[in-house]
Image (tube, rainbow, N blue to C red):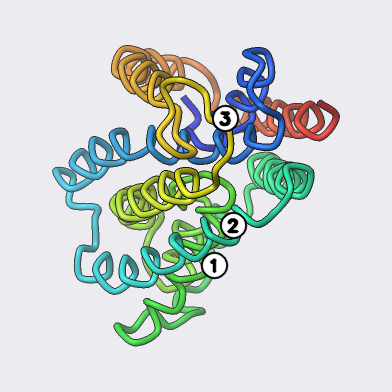
Amino acid sequence: MFGIGGGSILVPSLILIFYSMGFEGSIIVLMAIGTSLASIIFSAISSALSHHKKRSVKWLLVTPLSIGMIIGAVVGAGFAATLSSEILKWVITVFLIVIGMEMIIGFTQTLANKKKGILSLSKFIAPVHGSWIGFLSSIIGIGGGSFTTPLMIAGGYNIRQGIGTAAACGVPISAAGAMSYMYYGEISNLDLPSGAFGYVFWPAVVSISLASIFTANIGANVSHSISENTLKIFFGIFLIMVAIMVITN
């Protein structure tokens, strides 16, 4: 409905759900992040194929970006595994507030309307950008679209190309991140819940993936019946409220 990746909603939702399920407090945030990344793999593939059909994916740029993103995602997961739940919650809270403000203010759209080509996205520079996007996305539990789309626009591409390429890049980020969270969870020697492999809770991954097949079209239809600006403002406010819930839980 809002045209963004599900990680912004999945991670805080899973944190609250895992608390209610009585999971061990020290693993809840890591489990939410890892589970979110694993869930995003399937939706990212579907989204990438959809944007490919519309010729909005710049595949020549996906490859160099993905190289950096995979490395960044692996390093980011390892770094996140060393952080406490409280620090991770603060990181997620700040991210949600920033994205909420972006939805209200519309910085990306403003950037798209300005002069193009602010940043270089050459095949040598793109992996560098990909590494920090992968690193931050892996820590937060998202597919990276919130970072990749503005980067593409700043590099001189239109917003549709930015969204399409970001969707394709979400596949390597989420896959590398999810596998890393599984690995670090398995070697942690912590008491993991039944159904989990590392920091990925597979019953949730399956449920989320199946549900999204049916609800994505509903959201798309609703988005066409309500003003885009109204949608973004309400969603921005919603994200900020969720951020407050995460940090106060």
> Circle 1 — which element?
loop
Q: Amino acid at mark 1?
A: Lys
> Which residue is at the far bottom?
124
In this figure, which residue is indicated by the disc labeled 1?
A: 114
In the rendered picture of this protein, how many numbered marks are placed on residues? 3
> Circle 2 — which element?
helix
In this figure, which residue is indicated by the disc labeled 2?
A: 110
31 or 7: nearer the viewer: 31
- Mark 3 crowdedness (10 Å alpha carbons): few <14, some 14-19, many ≥20: some
Q: Residue at x 67, y 13 (%)?
A: 20
- Residue 147 is labelled as none
134 or 153: nearer the viewer: 134
Report which quarter residue 227 is drawn in: top right
Q: Residue at x 38, y 77 (%)?
A: 126
Q: Nearer the viewer, mark 3 or mark 2?
A: 3
> Which residue is at the far front?
189
Q: Earlier in the sequence, mark 3 or mark 2?
A: 3
Q: Quadrant of the C terminus?
A: top right
In this figure, which residue is indicated by the disc labeled 3?
A: 9
Q: Whole-Å distance between the Cαs marked 3 and 1? A: 30 Å
Q: Residue at x 63, y 32 (%)?
A: 28
